[in-house]
Amino acid sequence: MRVSSSNSTFERECFFIAPIGEEGSPIRRRSDPVHRHIVSPAAKAVGLKAVRADELAAPGRITNQIIDHLLHARTAVADLTGRNPNVFYELGVRHMANLPVALIVAHDEPALPFDLAQMRVIRYDHTSLDSAERCRQTLVEHLRAGLEGAVDSPISDFEHPPGGDRFEQWFSEMVDDLRETVAARLAEDLKRREETGEADPEVDGESQRRVEAALDDAVDEAVEDLRESALIEIDPSPLVGRPCDPHVLLYDEQQIVSEFLESIWQGFAKETGIPRFKYGYLWVLRDKESGEPLYDMGRIWAKQFRHDFDHRPLSETGIRPGMRLEAIRPPRRLFRQHP
């Protein structure tokens, strides 16, 4: 079915960014069912119509039409399966415009590039009715969130907490802003009291010290609550061989293990020279609380079950929000247990 574009149709459109391929090709045989049974029903559930690039009917250059839909469609879905260059280009346009887009990818797709590994990605198996239905239901939630204003983009103004190392910067700035705001209000109040003759330097000084102490306690408590409920802390110091600030990551129970490990590896790869895909061999995570290495993850786990990579979500590995981990060299005894 061909569609034409106008302002009114854009308001009802969910643009489907996807590898399409030639008619009858393996890419098309996979993309069509995803469009028909996952993306279109999800879009319909939120009152929109899913449109793919090959369904555009307006005359003119197809690239210009696609850009038009990328910049004006109410929301979008991007299928990252196969790492298609056109898909990544179109996703970049959508991100640059800071517009909502939900991400999906095949369940057996290898770990995504680092810039996307921090984002929420829905995995699906288009050959499984149960998997397709779960994907559709989750996609409806993502689309609905986008329609309500949530934008998960690495090129945002950080109104929403970003991921990875950018989250550390955002979190630190948020705490500093809170302290500065309270301090400024205290200064304004003291100035007003001085102007009205109500100020008492001794009393006001003691009062300000009490407020600042209470603020420190409140900020520390809020930070601890946030860490326990939504964050994971990874300390690379033992692996790097020098004191380092810990990496703070947002916990996403649906993030697959390979993407999680990739995002951590990126933080120390250059300094240590450790190649990619060497988790369990040249580095491993250890739970600071229990002292136990988290060995059964990554390629070691995948090989045991004849998989190419560890596709399990974090929720199935025992990794939970609030954990404090450290990256270390694997203890020698682990090599004897896992040759």
Image (cartoon, grey):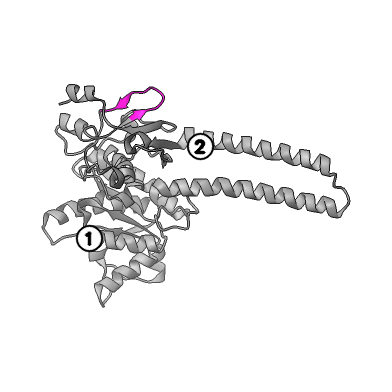
Up-down relation of residue 320 to residue 69 (above or below): above
Residue 238 relative to residue 311: left or right: right
Query: To which quarter of the image does residue 129 belong?
Result: top left
User: SS for tag 1?
Assistant: helix
Give the residue furthest to the right. Answer: 197
On whether residue 222 falls in the magenta region, the answer is: no
Q: Quadrant of the N terminus?
A: bottom left
Which label is found at residue 20?
A: none
- Residue 242 x %, y %: 38, 38
Q: Main secondary structure of the magenta part?
A: loop
Q: Which residues are magenta?
A: 286-295
Q: In terms of sequence position, does the residue under pointer 1 or pointer 2 come before the other?
A: 1
For the point 47% across and 49% down, the residue is 169
Up-down relation of residue 114 to residue 295 (above or below): below
Which label is found at residue 226?
A: 2
Residue type marked 1: Pro
Q: Quadrant of the C terminus?
A: top left
Up-down relation of residue 89 to residue 236 (above or below): below
Quote the CA–CA distance across marks 1 and 2: 37 Å
- Residue 49 x %, y %: 34, 59
Give the residue furthest to the front. Answer: 242
Residue, disc 1: 85
- Residue 62 x %, y %: 25, 72
On whether residue 289 falls in the magenta region, the answer is: yes
Query: To which quarter of the image does residue 89 belong?
Result: bottom left
